[in-house]
Image (cartoon, helix red, strand yellow):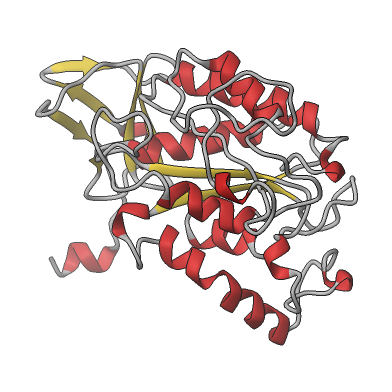
Amino acid sequence: DESGSMDDNRQDIVNNANNFFSRALASGLDFRMGVTNVCDPTGSSKAIVGKFCSKISTNTSDDGGTDRFLLPSEQSIFSSCINNPPGYEGGSEYGLVNSSEAVKKHLPRASNVPDKIRPEAKLVIILATDEVPQELGNGVLGYDDFEKCQLDAAKQAAVDTAIKPHMDLLSGVSDPEGAAMFHLIGGVCNNSCNADVGHGYKELAQALGGQIGDVCQKDLGNTLQVIIDSIIGLASPVKLDYVPISASLAVSLDGVEVKRSRTNGFDYRAAQNTLAFINVKYKKGSEVVASYHRWTRQADIDNP
């Protein structure tokens, strides 16, 4: 979101986005980044709703260049695109439709195609905004609802109905290839910079396993690390059969012991019950052996 209300947050978002990119590099993830806008789907930039940026530009009406994902080597372009996403937004804040179109425009999945989501990649959306989705302004919510921590039952039902097409897409119901994790850096309850509470977005984050960070924070470091950790966990092909006692974990990869480390080894992601390999190379068909202790109930022991 680069609308006018974000002027006091944008440099912080750029700084934190660069921090996020650097953390993704340090994690050893094989990633691609796409940066899009929140343009009005009926406005002057409607043709580029959901389009990805690949061009360094300070022109606020720039179309973003070629619609494609950015590589890990293109952090400078990523930084510029975060500061100036494709198209002219003006006062538009259509985050729901742009999130969905950013997925649909880059399907079907395909290998080695710069503007398509890769077949085996895990899809993650991170939306940064200080406003409620403008899609909810047409009789769904009123101005007096924007700062409410909790909506009344009727308003919440209306929000749930309005976001259902986006929920269906991003949960994989309407298209399994569009399934995604959704994170929000937006207005939280009782925030410090008069941001709208992220109604509509927070429901997506809660339902799709994402994190919700406060857009008013100057330093989103801890939030970004939690997001990176969840992405690593989501991307891991190694899901354990049981929940381990974490400290007891020992892991080998193709017969070689792997040390536990958050910079160069394996780590455990409790939320997904997976093992993450950080800066440890492995190939399809590699054998992972994990040994660990786990808690069992007395009833399980007495009655196997």
Name of the residue lying farthest toward the bottom: 154
Can residue 146 be seen?
Answer: yes
Q: How many marks?
A: 0
Does 140 sit above or below residue 284?
below
Q: Is 221 displayed left or right of 270 in the figure?
A: right
Closest to the observer, 256 or 185 = 185
Name of the residue lying farthest toward the front: 44
Can residue 211 be seen?
Answer: no
The location of residue 51, given as percent across then percent down, is 52, 41
Q: Is 265 displayed left or right of 301 in the figure?
A: right
Q: Quadrant of residue 284?
A: top left
Measuring 65% from the left and 59% from the top, which residue is drawn there?
Answer: 42
The location of residue 88, given as percent across then percent down, is 72, 40
Does 226 sit above or below residue 59?
below
Closest to the observer, 125 or 247 = 125
Measuring 78% from the left and 54% from the top, which residue is drawn there?
Answer: 131
Closest to the observer, 43 or 282 = 43
Does 152 sit above or below residue 86?
below
Q: Quadrant of residue 149?
A: bottom right
Measuring 25% from the left and 16% from the top, which residue is drawn there?
Answer: 281
Quadrant that contains the N terminus: top right
